[in-house]
Amino acid sequence: DAKTTQPPSMDCAEGRAANLPCNHSTISGNEYVYWYRQIHSQGPQYIIHGLKNNETNEMASLIITEDRKSSTLILPHATLRDTAVYYCIVSTGANNLFFGTGTRLTVIP
Amino acid sequence: SQTIHQWPATLVQPVGSPLSLECTVEGTSNPNLYWYRQAAGRGLQLLFYSVGIGQISSEVPQNLSASRPQDRQFILSSKKLLLSDSGFYLCAWSGRNTEAFFGQGTRLTVV
């Protein structure tokens, strides 16, 4: 069963920040929050993950609330190539990744 | 750098025929290996994972089996395909406590 809740779809204007929310109210203390994305007909691509601190890399930023019950993935300047399904996953490790149906992000020109 | 190869990219097979999908990883040793399936319009479902040669864990009962004959080789098989085996099959690898990296997938259509 999914441990996360994500909106099924979102739109974002090109060049603007895309903020994708995720609720994970039953997260355990040893579970990480992972974000992946899947562009149509390709394998999922790892984006970022975190435990309790906010994280940033060349692709995105991950903001985790202090109680860890929710998080937000931020794509600072969305491009058309960021159109994809974004998956938020909570897991203790890669051997237990459960992919739900994610959020379909559409970047609009 | 590490790379993962999965083939073929697409496959059309008749019902009742056998299946063999192969996945290999380069640039790392002793990886965790995974097979996922994605039905049309749905999320990914973990089918098998392996932490070492000959060690296979199955997550769901099904018509498929997996084998790991070598450290960086993971094979998904079936003796007789069913229509319900159609889907997008993805191989992935990870380190012991790292994120997973996916191959480009095999789109299987059973007819």
Image (cartoon, coloured by chain):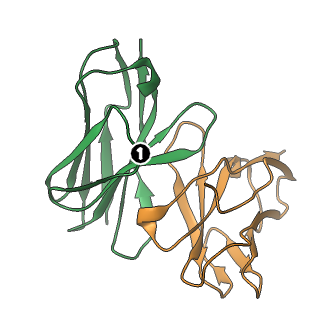
Chain colours: A orange, B green
Tell me if residue A90 comes above or below residue A9 in the rendering.
Answer: below
The residue beneath circle 1 is: B60
Instruction: Indicate the chain on which mark 1 is placed.
Output: B
Q: Whole-percent x and y of residue A7?
A: 80, 53
Q: Extreme left residue here?
A: B69
Q: Residue at x 24, y 58 (%)?
A: B26
Q: Quadrant of the C terminus of chain A?
A: top right
| Secondary structure of residue under mark 1 | loop
Residue B9 sits in which quadrant?
A: top left
Tell me if residue B93 comes above or below residue B23 in the rendering.
Answer: below
User: Is A46 placed left or right of B19 in the picture?
Assistant: right
Amino acid on which disc 1 is placed: Val
Q: Whole-percent x and y of residue B51?
A: 26, 64
Q: Residue at x 77, y 68 (%)?
A: A76
Q: Quadrant of the N terminus of chain A?
A: bottom right
**Label 1 packing within 10 angstroms: few (<14), some (14-19), many (20+):** few
A18 or A104: nearer the eye? Answer: A104
Q: Extreme front residue here?
A: B61
Residue B85 sits in which quadrant?
A: top left
Q: Whole-percent x and y of residue B29?
A: 20, 68
User: Is A68 placed left or right of B97 in the picture?
Assistant: right
Tell me if residue A35 comes above or below residue B110 in the rendering.
Answer: below
Q: Residue at x 64, y 82 (%)?
A: A55
